[in-house]
Amino acid sequence: MRVAIAAWEIGRSGTGLGVKIGGLGQVLDELPRELIAAARDEGLQLEIEVLSPCFAHYDKSRLVSTGQHIPVCLDNHWFDFEVFKYQFDDGLTGVYFWDEFQLHWTNANAVYPLDPLLGLRLYSSVSQAMAGYMRSRRFDTVHSHDHHVALLPFYLGDEFLSRVPHHFTIHNATYQGNCPTGGNGYELIESLNLSGKALFHKYFDFFDHVNLMKGCMIKTHENHGKITTVSGDFGGTWGYAAELRESAEEINCRAKELNLGRVVKEAFVPNRFLDVFEKLPIVGITNGLSDRNRPENLPELKAGWLRQAEKSGDGSEGIFRNPQVLEKMLEEDHDFDTNRMEVKSELKRLLHLEAFGREPTPELVLVTAVGRLVAQKNLGLVADVAQKTLAHDPGVKFVVLASAPEGEGEGQEIKADFVELARRFGDRFYFRSDFSGPFSKLILAGGDFCLIPSRFEPCGLVDYEASLLGTLVIGRRTGGLSKVDQCAYLYDWLDIGDRKGEASAFLEQIKVALDVFRDKPEAHQGMVRKAMSIDAGWRKSAVQYLRLYRYGMLVKQWEKERHLPQYSAEEAASRLAHEEPAFGALFSSVWGGKLDLELEMALNALRSEKR
C-alpha cells in the first residue's frame, strides 16, 4: 500500500528539514512511523511519502532533486515548482515543493501568510504542484491534513478520485481557510486555475468568503472518502468529532442549562457556524503520543541528553537558571515510573528550587500551567483564579511558563497579569515567558496539578504529557481533553462571555483537587497512578487509520462493481464487511444515492444480525 500524506507542517524540525509550529507538526512527526510499524505487525508493506512545501530555511544541498518541474497557474500566469526528496533515517520519504517567489519569505517560525488572499494563493500553488506529482506516481491513498492542502482533491481531478481514495483530517476547525471574495467569488476561484462557475457556490461559498475546509469536506464526502478529526471514535460519539457536529442552537441550550437558566452571553461554537459539519459524517481518530513522553523514557529527564543540550546552547544562559538544579539534573538521570515515585518527589523539590530559589516546605502543592497565551488556551482564567486559590490553601504555589505570540493583544494582556501576580506574590507565584524545553518538562514532571482551561482543544497533547508524568489535569471538559476524564478534575462550562461564571466553575474544581490532595492522600495517589498508566500510545490510532485506508480502497472497488449486471447489495455488504470489519462503521451514503442507500441498508442489516 502506497500512501501520500500532504501537510503544511511535518515536524522533524530537529533535522532542519521540517517545521513544528503547533500540534499538526507533532502529529505528522509521529504518525507516519507509527503507521508503518502498525502495518508491519499486520503483515502489510506500507510505503508513505509525506508531501510538504520546501521552506526557505531548508538546506537544499541535503535534498535530492527529482529533476521534476511541475507547472502551476495563478492569474493565468504559469510557472514551475521544483520537486526534491529526502530519505529520513526511519525510512520515511519526504517530498518537498519549492518556488522561490512563493516561498522565499518563509523561515522556521513563519510559514503561514497573515493575509488571507496571499495564503489562498500560496496554498493553491503548492496544492497544484502536489497534485501534479501525485498524478505522475502510483498511490493507493491520499491523506490530506487541514485547510492548507484542502484544494488537493480539486487539482487531482475526478478521474484520479474515481480510482484513488482521498481522506481529509481536520486538526483545528477554528481555522478553515476563509478568504473574502469582495463579491467576486467566481473570479477568485478562476484565478486559482479552477472553474469558478462550476465550483464556487457548490463547494466554497461561505457568506461571500472562499472557505477551503468546506470545499474539501464536500469533495471528499461525495467521493466516498472520510472526513476525520483528532479525537473521538468512528461514530463521532465523543470528543472533537462530536463537538463539530453540534449546531449553535444545541450548544446554546446546553450553555443555558449550565448557567442555571441565565441568559447566555456567548457560547463558543467549535464548527464556527459551518453547517456542513452538521450534515456530513465526521470520524474521530484520537491522536496518540509517542512512548518517549513516558517518565521512564523522557530524554529531558536523562543526564546525558541534558548535558548535550547544555553543551549545544548559545552559552548566554544554562538550560536551568539555578546552579544547584543544573548540577543535579546533569549529574544523574531522573526518569521514574509508578514504582519509583520518590524520583518525582525529587523533581518537585528541584522545580521549587528552580522557581523560588529555596528548599520547599513539606506542605507544598505545586499548581502549574504551560502553554501559549492565545485565546484558544484561555490561560487568562489561571490569572483570574490564582489569588483565591492562594487564599484557599496556604501551601499552594503556582509555576507558569507561557509566552504570547507577537501581535497577540489578548496574550500580552494575560502576560501582564501574570507579571503582576509574580510581583505581588513573588514567594508563591512564579512566571516565566521565554520558552525552555527542559524547563517545561521539569514543570510537567515536578508539578502536582496542571491547569488546562482551554476554550476548545481538538485533541490535547499537554493533558497526555502531564498525566503520563503523574501531574493531574484540572481543566475544562472539551474536545479531546475528555479522554483523561477518569484521572483528572474537569469542569463543564460553555458561556465564554461569562468569564466570572467560568472562573467560579474552574476554581471549584481546583478546590476539590486540593482538598483530595490534603484529606485523601491515598485517593490522590490512586489517581496519579491511573494517569501514569494511560494508554496514550499511537498503536490503536494507527490501526484505525489503516482500517480507514483499507476501507477507502475497498469502496473504490465497490464503485466499479456496483454497475455490473450480477451486482447484489447483500453479497457486496457481506464481502466488504468480511474484508474490512470496520467497513460498515465507516460507510455512509452520498446525497441519498440509490445504490449507496441499498449498500448502507445491507450493512446495517448485517450488524443487526451480529448483535
Image (cartoon, rainbow, N blue to C red):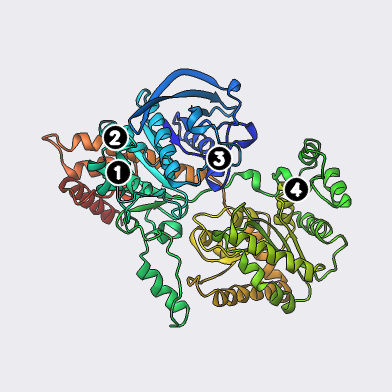
Question: Of callouts 1 and 3, which one flags the residue occurring earlier in the amino acid sequence?
Answer: 3
Q: Is residue 318 left or right of residue 553?
A: right
Q: Which mark is residue 30?
A: 3
Q: Which mark is residue 111?
A: none
Q: Is residue 376 above or below residue 178?
A: below
Q: What is the three-letter code of the residue carrying label 4?
A: Asp
Q: CA distance from mark 3 to mark 2?
A: 27 Å
Outermost residue toward the top?
Answer: 67
According to the image, label 1 marks what residue?
Answer: 219
Residue 45: x, y in percent? 45, 28
Q: Is residue 363 above or below residue 19?
A: below
- Visible in this render: residue 165? no
**Pointers 4 and 3 in contact (C-beta within 8 Å):** no
Q: Is residue 547 left or right of residue 103?
A: left
Viewer-nearest of discs 3 and 2: 2
Viewer-nearest of discs 4 and 3: 3
Question: Of callouts 3 and 2, which one flags the residue occurring earlier in the amino acid sequence?
Answer: 3
Residue 205: x, y in percent? 30, 51
Q: What is the three-letter code of the residue carrying label 2?
A: Leu
Label 1, secondary structure: give it. helix
According to the image, label 2 marks what residue?
Answer: 161
Q: CA distance from mark 4 to mark 1?
A: 48 Å
Q: What is the three-letter code of the residue carrying label 1?
A: Lys
Q: What is the three-letter code of the residue carrying label 3?
A: Glu
